Amino acid sequence: MLSFNTTPKYYDIWGLSIYPYCFSYNHFENNEIFYDIIQTYIVRLLNSLPKDKLLARISSFNGFSIYKTPKFMNTYYDGRIRTDLIPSINMEVHKAYAKSGLVYKKYVTSDCRYEDWAFHIMSIQNSAVRIMITFEVLFNWLV
């Protein structure tokens, strides 16, 4: 799966999971602060990426993504918070960076379930999917 960058900001922080921010930032205290911290972090990573390289991550959408459909056939999104899919070491690292334990804040989707992005994590585990971001910009995002 390949998602494209946006400019001037990487807007989809909710859908982004990249080490050390390995789980949805919404499920930690002070998540408003971490929106900007993670956004600055990902923009710095993308700006320093060599032009012939892609940035690996656990999850990302960011506006426009290309999926190799057969790799995602045994994957689904059901809105549940899937801490069971995250390696415990990754969860501990994110907790340390967030200076918070996991909290279950209810950010409700249109079908009244919790928000979560287990879809990409399941695809990695089920089909060895590689999820990448390119520095290439397809769309300008106006603030």
Image (cartoon, rainbow, N blue to C red):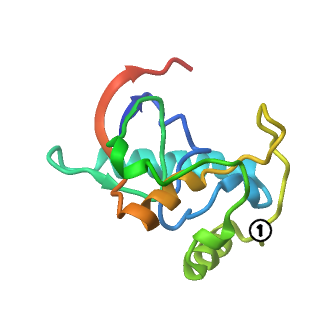
Q: Quadrant of residue 104?
A: bottom right
> Which residue appears farthest toward the bottom when viewing the image?
89
- Secondary element type, mark 1: loop
Q: Residue at x 67, y 55 (%)?
A: 25
Asked if residue 26 lies left or right of residue 1, the reply is: right
Q: Amino acid at mark 1?
A: Leu
Residue 127: give x, y in percent of width and height: 38, 61
Q: Nearer the viewer, residue 134 or 49?
A: 134
Q: Is residue 6 above or below residue 100?
A: above
> Which residue appears farthest toward the left when viewing the image?
52
Q: Would residue 1 be seen by someone viewing this image from the given angle?
A: no
Residue 22: give x, y in percent of width and height: 56, 64
Quarter holding the C terminus is top right
Residue 115: give x, y in percent of width and height: 72, 46
Q: Residue at x 67, y 69 (%)?
A: 83
Residue carrying label 1: 102
Q: Would residue 121 be seen by someone viewing this image from the given angle?
A: yes
